[in-house]
Image (cartoon, grey):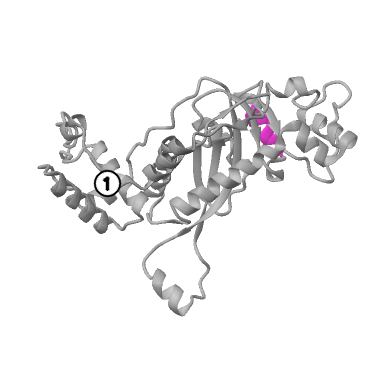
């Protein structure tokens, strides 16, 4: 199991690393996150207009690239659709490009079915950190609720995230109703992870048999590092075929929960709290789209934006001991 000995831990939990930072490059990367430099490559200009449709039906005027570009700027600057239309028009005018500007109706309609590329796959097995947070639904009349108050219950949706402990990248996301619990979304998250998984680390809400089963079905060698409940009891096969959860209980009985956290690598779960905080500070705590399909597109684009920002500026770690 991942906590039997320190020698075994390197195969199951993120390596203990020491920061080695080139502060000049790091500061430059952080400033680049706020840069307003905009350019269009020749490929982007050529691919702005949609390709001619062969089958029956209406002809799309804008390519998926054009729609994704506009929606990305909308997410970054937290704009309404009409404001996004105006921003794209201003950028194209400043760059002297003779390209048509997608109107707000086209952006809203195409966002319903737009396919956003998944995060790229890493060759090394990932240590997944899973957690969730609430996103409020922003809609008409929101300013009235803030000014005069509202008796109706606020509308929320739950954003379930899986992030890479080593890179901080968002590798999978699922948007559900506020009634969905964390454990039930492990399967959908793992389906969206494009690459091998070394471990899954989550809080006590993931202490469920179906969570262990979902991980074992897709990644048999992956460790599940979840704290058992205070009243947890060993399984019926603890003597003949102990499970990962049985091993967690044995370690807690021997060294206490603090000792188990250090030995298992559970302390790395705190990194997902920073990832969620980054989402709230950069993207915001709300959803501007009104339908399920458009909200899913908004979340996927937001994850892509955050991943790109991390590539622009993030300390690199190397192991020194």
Res 143 → quadrant: bottom left
Residue 210 colored magenta?
yes
Q: Residue at x 82, y 41 (%)?
A: 257
From where the camera sits, is residue 207 visible?
Answer: yes
Q: Which residue is mark 1?
A: 70
274 or 155, which is in the foreground? Answer: 274
Q: Which residue is drawn at the image coordinates 80% and 23% (left, top)?
A: 5
Question: Observer-nearest residue: 149 or 41?
Answer: 41
Name the image quarter holding the C terminus.
top right
Q: Is residue 231 magenta?
A: no
* Res. 244 image quadrant: top right
Quarter of the figure that contains the N terminus: top right
Mark 1, residues whose alpha carbon is within 10 Å: few (<14), some, or many (≥20)? many
State the residue in front, 17 or 139. 17
Is 3 placed above or below 135 here? above
Q: Main secondary structure of the magenta part?
A: helix
The spot of residue 93 in percent (x, y) is 13, 49
Residue 262 % position (x, y): 76, 35
Q: Image point 62% across, 45% down: which residue?
A: 182
Left or right: where 310 falls relative to 186 = left
Q: Is residue 62 left or right of residue 265?
A: left
Give the residues drawn in magenta, as a range. Answer: 208-215
Q: Is residue 41 above or below residue 284?
A: above
- Kindly identify the residue that appears in the image at 69 percent across and 45 percent down: 205
Residue 40's x, y, as percent? 21, 37
Q: Is residue 104 visible?
A: no
Q: Position of residue 82 (x, y in %)?
A: 24, 58
Would you place residue 181 above or below residue 13 in this image?
Answer: below
163 vs 56, left or right, is right
Which element carries disc 1, helix, strand or loop?
helix
């Amino acid at each position: 199991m991942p906590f039997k000995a320190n020698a075994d831990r390197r195969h199951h939990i993120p390596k203990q690393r020491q920061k080695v930072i080139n502060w000049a490059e790091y500061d430059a990367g952080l400033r680049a996150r706020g840069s307003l430099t905009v350019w269009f490559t020749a490929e982007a200009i050529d691919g702005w207009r949609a390709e001619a449709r062969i089958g029956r039906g209406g002809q799309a005027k804008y390519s998926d690239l054009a729609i994704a570009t506009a929606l990305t700027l909308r997410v970054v600057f937290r704009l309404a659709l009409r404001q996004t239309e105006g921003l794209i028009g201003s950028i194209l005018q400043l760059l002297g490009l003779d390209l048509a500007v997608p109107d707000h109706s086209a952006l809203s309609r195409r966002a319903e079915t737009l396919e956003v590329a998944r995060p790229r796959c890493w060759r090394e097995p990932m240590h997944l950190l899973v957690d969730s947070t609430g996103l409020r639904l922003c809609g008409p009349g929101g300013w009235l609720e803030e000014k005069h108050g509202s008796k109706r219950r606020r509308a929320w949706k739950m954003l379930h995230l899986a992030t890479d402990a080593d890179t901080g990248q968002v590798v999978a996301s699922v948007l559900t109703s506020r009634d969905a619990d964390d454990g039930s979304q492990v399967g959908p998250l793992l389906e969206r992870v494009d690459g091998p998984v070394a471990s899954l680390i989550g809080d006590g809400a993931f202490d469920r048999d179906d969570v262990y089963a979902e991980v074992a079905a897709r990644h048999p060698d992956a460790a599940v590092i979840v704290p058992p409940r205070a009243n947890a009891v060993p399984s019926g096969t603890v003597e003949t075929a102990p499970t990962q959860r049985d091993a967690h209980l044995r370690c807690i009985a021997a060294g206490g929960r603090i000792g188990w956290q250090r030995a298992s690598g559970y302390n790395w779960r705190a990194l997902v709290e920073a990832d969620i905080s980054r989402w709230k500070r950069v993207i915001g705590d709300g959803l501007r789209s009104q339908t399920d399909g458009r909200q899913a597109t908004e979340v996927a684009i937001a994850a892509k934006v955050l991943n790109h920002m991390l590539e622009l500026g993030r300390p690199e770690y190397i192991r020194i001991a």
